[in-house]
Amino acid sequence: MTFNEFKDRYDDEGSVVLLEGKRNVLEPDRDKLHELGRLLASTTEKMIFRSGNAPGSDELFAGGVASVAPDRMQVIVPYTGHRKKQNRDFDTVSLDDVNLSEEPEVVYQSKSNKKTEKHIDRYVAGDHNKFTVKAAYIIRDTVKVLGTEEVPPATFGIFYDDLKKPMSGGTGHTINVCRQNDIPTIDQSVWFEWL
């Protein structure tokens, strides 16, 4: 997919594009993430950009978007106040404000992450401790893709992945949820060519 094909297809009202990935970004790649966020925000008008407000990829992509169109950046956070200083007053949705018992598909698809599967139901039931908080991050990743009653689903995902160990961790979970729900994704092997 070329950059122009992407813009033509996804710069529509209601389009939500995920911009996220690994916390560890290779030093030569850091400027590219910021540059892509800036390019997307400066050459599109309608799409909304979404991330999870994590350090690394999320922060770099969001910084690029914020330099042009901070009003089109949305973050889904695992709890109120998560990395508040880095949030830059973006449109923020906290899991604390989502009634997860009313989101059975989010809960179900979050359980596909085997590392946190046993903690998901406990977290949803209100058992928030140092063990179940890990589930909040995976639920947050699922919400970024599926949305909620109040949050529209994603329509496309742009990721910075670890190409030596792809599809691992929270990034891998998010990409998997996209794929399970027929939401197209690309990683830097595609979007580096856009810069």
Image (cartoon, grey):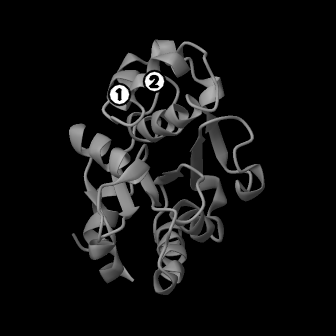
* Residue closest to the far bottom: 28
Find out whether the residues at labels 2 and 1 contact each other: C-beta distance under 8 Å. Answer: yes
**Going 55% across and 28% down the picture, which residue do you hit?**
132
**Above or below, comparing residue 110 to residue 122 in the picture:** below
Secondary-structure class at tag 2: helix
**Above or below, comparing residue 91 to residue 67 in the picture:** above
Residue at image mark 2: 120
Q: Which quadrant would the N terminus be assigned to in this image?
A: bottom left
* Upstream in sequence: badge 2 or badge 1: 1
**Above or below, comparing residue 3 to residue 183 in the picture:** below
Q: Position of residue 34 (x, y in %)?
A: 54, 75
Q: What residue type is labelled 1?
A: Lys
* Residue closest to the far front: 131
Q: Which quadrant would the C terminus be assigned to in this image?
A: bottom left
Whether residue 155 appears in this view of the structure is: no
> Front-most of 155 and 83?
83
Residue at image mark 1: 111
Q: Position of residue 81 (x, y in %)?
A: 75, 41
> Front-most of 67 and 133?
133
**Going 57% across and 31% down the picture, which residue do you hit?**
131
